Amino acid sequence: MPYYIYRVTPIGPIRQLAKITELEAFKDASNEAKRLRRESELAAGELIKTIFASNELQAEELLNEPRGEEPMTGEDY
């Protein structure tokens, strides 16, 4: 399964997703995402995200899923 890199732009309650590229190896995808984050001029709230999925449709569905609460560590209470 490939790794997809997307530019995620929040527009009100929805997210606009723009596929940048797909790569087969995690290391390559991670390095490319880091490079894009450094070199791109991102608007407020805009993100570069990497997602592992079987196809573009699944990648976009995963990126649009609401995230749960952040896990608590022992120091959070």
Image: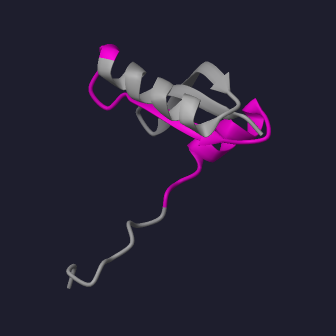
From which residue to which does the magenta span run? Answer: 39-67
Q: How many marks?
A: 0
- Residue 19 on image: x %, y %: 61, 21
Q: Vertical placement of 41 versus 34: above or below?
A: above
- Residue 15 on image: x %, y %: 50, 33
- Is residue 29 visible from the viewing direction of this image? yes
How is colour applied across the structure in the image?
A: one colour
- Residue 55 in the magenta stretch? The answer is yes
- Is residue 8 visible from the viewing direction of this image? no
- Residue 2 on image: x %, y %: 72, 34
Horizontal side of residue 68 vs 70, given as left or right = right
Q: Name which residue lies at 41% across and 67% down.
A: 69
- Residue 22 in the magenta stretch? The answer is no
Horizontal side of residue 16 vs 61, given as left or right = left
Question: Which quadrant holds the C terminus?
Answer: bottom left
Which corner quadrant of the image does residue 59 belong to?
Answer: top right
Horizontal side of residue 25 vs 15, given as left or right = right
Which corner quadrant of the image does residue 41 belong to?
Answer: top left
- Residue 33 on image: x %, y %: 46, 28
Q: Name which residue lies at 54% across and 27% down.
A: 6
* Front one among 48 and 33: 33
* Front one among 20 and 14: 20
Question: Which quadrant holds the N terminus?
Answer: top right
Which corner quadrant of the image does residue 50 belong to?
Answer: top right
